[in-house]
Amino acid sequence: MPWTPTPAREWQTDNSMLSGTWFRLPDDLNTVHDPQDTTSKPCGEAGLVDLAGRGDDQSAALCGDRSIRIRDGGADWTTAAEHSDAVGLSADDNRFVIAVKGTECDGLELQRFTIKDGELDIKKKTRCFKDIQPDAGNIAVSNHGGSIWLWAGDTIRGKS
């Protein structure tokens, strides 16, 4: 795993930092490594578009068939939403964020959700990023605390 202690220092590689984290394997982006050091393919033949892990035991996967699959408490991957309008997702220590094609606004909506009893618990409040309608896999979403960031093409926008 490449990392640097500060922007002015050289990049270093330390694969021991990979243990205990969620990530996609660089040589097979459809395979997920989990904090228990096991691997799986949450989307099977549909392909993995995006992945977000929260803590050691919860993860959400956006699949190529637009389904959202979740893993809760070390259980197997299950489908929490079929044929979603999702195009990206992210997670912080408290919740997940999903980017969906806007229904309440002309653009992308970012919605926070948690996984509760094996299902998505989507919060009612959404954030609208007008005039951004990228395809799945062409955006990056980030959230931390009360802030949400969206990166689509050459555009980066944030909201608190």
Image (cartoon, rainbow, N blue to C red):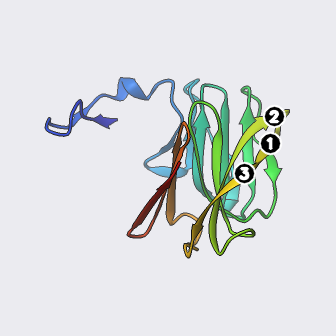
Between 34 and 142, the residue placed more toward the observer is 142
The residue where tag 2 is placed is: 116
Where disc 1 sits, the SS reads: strand
Q: CA distance from mark 3 to mark 2?
A: 18 Å
Residue 3: horizontal and vertical position, in percent? 29, 35
Image position of 14 with respect to 151: above or below: above
**From the viewer's perspective, is the residue at label 3 or at label 2 nearer?**
3
Q: Residue at x 66, y 48 (%)?
A: 61
**From the viewer's perspective, is the residue at label 3 or at label 1 nearer?**
3
Tell me, yes or no, whether the two marked residues, 1 and 2, touch with CB atoms within 8 Å.
yes
- Quadrant the N terminus occupies: top left
Disc number placed over residue 121 in the picture, else none: 1
Image position of 45 with respect to 132: above or below: above
Q: In terms of image quadrants, where is residue 155?
A: bottom left
The residue where tag 3 is placed is: 125
Q: In terms of image quadrants, where is residue 59?
A: top right
Label 2, residues with CA under 10 Å away: few <14, some 14-19, many ≥20: few
